[in-house]
Image: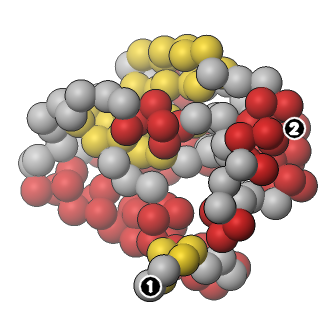
Amino acid sequence: MIDPDAFLETEGRRVWTLERNAEAWHQAFTVLRGGLEAGTVERVVVVCVLQGAGKSTWVAQREPEAGTVHFDAALPGARHRAPIIALARSCNIPVAAVWIRAPLALALERNRQRPADRRVPEASIHSVDRLFEPPTTDEGFAAVRIVEG
């Protein structure tokens, strides 16, 4: 699994700043690119949804599939998902989407239950909710799966 937030971890807690976030995304793409170029990735699955809706939990509950990489991030719009799709397709690797469809109220409640350093500001969750465009095959996904959160 590739989760840009994982690159925000420090000893004992997660630290978010604008600069650290930009570097975390850079590192996530570096890891994805490395796997694609090494030929160890046969399929990319983009898991997108509101923060707190259950992306990471859903991925953690999957049986590992050799050659499959799950990219775990909110990615609210097609423009946010496009770089991942383009990178995978440049290596002739298919990309699927999993949309964890969960109500805003549920995502907010789950977010409130997280440890303090892992909580996302509620304004950010509301922003992703406003910006969210359901993933489609028209944007380049080989398949789109909807999972009720």
For the residue pair 22 and 10, the one nearer the viewer reads as 10
Give, as a three-letter code, the residue at label 1.
Glu
Q: Calculate the distance from the C-alpha at mark 1 to the C-alpha at mark 2.
A: 34 Å
User: Is 57 above or below relative to 17?
Assistant: above
* Quadrant of residue 7 within the rendered picture: bottom left
Give, as a three-letter code, the residue at label 2.
Arg
* Residue drawn 12% across the image and 35% down it: 66
* Residue drawn 31% across the image and 56% down it: 32
The secondary element bearing badge 1 is classed as: loop
The secondary element bearing badge 2 is classed as: helix
User: Is 13 above or below relative to 110?
Assistant: below
Colour scheme of the rendered structure: secondary structure
Q: Which residue is mark 1?
A: 11
Tell whether 44 sits left or right of 119.
left
* Quadrant of residue 38 within the rendered picture: bottom left
Tell whether 39 sits left or right of 134.
left
User: How many residues crowd around disc 2 within 10 Å: few (fewer than 14), some, or many (20 or more)?
Assistant: few
Q: Which residue is mark 2?
A: 130
Dot in front, 1 or 2 = 1
Tell whether 91 sits left or right of 129.
left
Give residue 34's position: percent from left, percent from top.
Answer: 22, 62
* Residue drawn 38% across the image and 53% down it: 2
Are the residues at dot 1 and dot 2 in contact (C-beta closer than 8 Å)? no
In the rendered image, is residue 92 in sight?
no
Give residue 74's position: percent from left, percent from top.
Answer: 62, 45
Q: Earlier in the sequence, mark 1 or mark 2?
A: 1
Give residue 120's position: percent from left, percent from top.
Answer: 74, 58
User: How many residues crowd around disc 1 within 10 Å: few (fewer than 14), some, or many (20 or more)?
Assistant: few
Tell whether 75 sits left or right of 121.
left
Give residue 85's position: percent from left, percent from top.
Answer: 43, 40
* Quadrant of residue 41 within the rendered picture: top left
